[in-house]
Amino acid sequence: MSMIEVINRIPTQLQKIGQNKEGLKLKLKEFLKADSEIRRIVIIASGTSYNAAFTTKHFAENINQVPVDIIYPNMFVHYYNHSLLDEKNLYIFISQGGKTKLVYEALQIVKNKKYRTISLTETLNSPIADIADIALEIGSENEEYLYRTLGYSATCATLSWIYISLLDICDKINEEEIDIYMQDYHSMIKNLMKIKENTIEWYKKHKFELMQKHNFLFAGTNDLWAVAQEADIKFMEMLPVFTNSFELEELIHGPQNSFNQNIGYFILSRSTEDREKARSIAAFIEKEISSCYLIGDYDEASFNVSPESKYFSNLEYITYFQVLAYMLSTDRGRDLTKGIYPRVVDYINKSL
Ligand SMILES: O=P(O)(O)OC[C@H]1O[C@](O)(CO)[C@@H](O)[C@@H]1O
């Protein structure tokens, strides 16, 4: 099974996640029944799992009116002030593999305090799922590659439905409003394969230029910053080349000094969010340094994602980068079934 087939499976899996929303809500309701007040949502996760939490943070904070903190497991276990842990918080531990050592240790810390814990893993048959108060599935079922594409999109989708369910449990949303989210979610799902096809066409025209780049840089604002961060990690682990990502404005607070023509630049933007800033930075890079690809929802963009969704368009944007990472890594001759340095585990092991 090639990775593009995994990417092709994303719409079906997202569909299933949407269909499971009642089951998800019931599990959460049963768990939270005694006390549904949530002061903060605190998420502990690494890599792509962290990026999925980051991508949906803005949505969660807007609809639930509850702050969402996302903390790397190592920071949480060793350097976080554990006296800040609060029984009114909801702690979510995400690990697609279900056995990331520090996510497990972080969960143990919160569990020892008897505070509320939820795990999100690919399978419930995993050490992290075993010790959480409630164990939820991400919805990726069985992703074949370690370089997660389906897992990222599924984690974003499941988190979004968790956030909508939390509103529902507290009677802060009615059926019609839930239906608006569901229709919008389906519009996103329906558009993913079209974006995939358009990306392949776009890639054919830009392949020569992209193959010459030594590094890549991604920037965006709001949730597109999180998508930029996920694109960054995909290119880094798959192509593999060294990459970096920035919040849009931060791009010109230092990084611009290191720009050169060997870097491929991607600026993610929406017409409603900092469009002029994105255009100005792209024009600067394009005229002074090298090609800069504006990835947006408008015609002047180098690639128009043409998103159909209002609330879940980040999953439309990431499709472009998932497909591009696959195309570039394949054309560079990368075998995605193997890590570049499997011997790393002789030095340090991240898994239980
Ligand atoms: O979600 P998990 O299984 O804890 O893994 C964390 C990260 O480690 C990787 O598997 C490898 O870096 C990433 O793909 C993933 O995001």
Image (cartoon, rainbow, N blue to C red):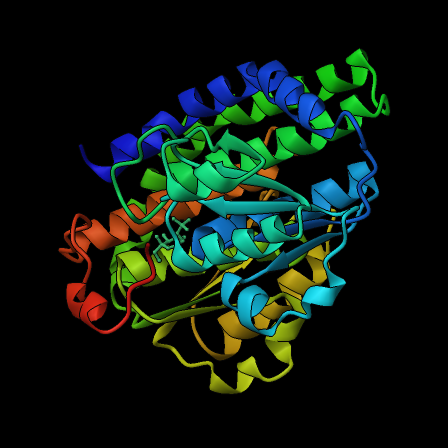
Q: Residue 184: horizontal and vertical position, in percent?
A: 65, 23
Dividing the picture into quadrants, the one containing residue 243 is bottom left
As drawn, 64 above or below 249: above
Q: Is residue 50 visible?
A: yes
Q: Residue 265: horizontal and vertical position, in percent?
A: 46, 66
Q: Residue at x 18, y 67 (%)?
A: 341
Q: Residue at x 79, y 46 (%)?
A: 88
Q: Quadrant location of the N terminus?
A: top left
Q: Residue at x 81, y 45 (%)?
A: 66
Q: Is residue 305 visible?
A: no
- Residue at the bottom extreme of this rendering: 257
| Left or right relative to 38: residue 56 | left
- Comparing 150 with 347, the one in front is 347
Q: Residue at x 56, y 32 (%)?
A: 158
As drawn, 115 above or below 347: above
- Comparing 206 with 81, the one in front is 81
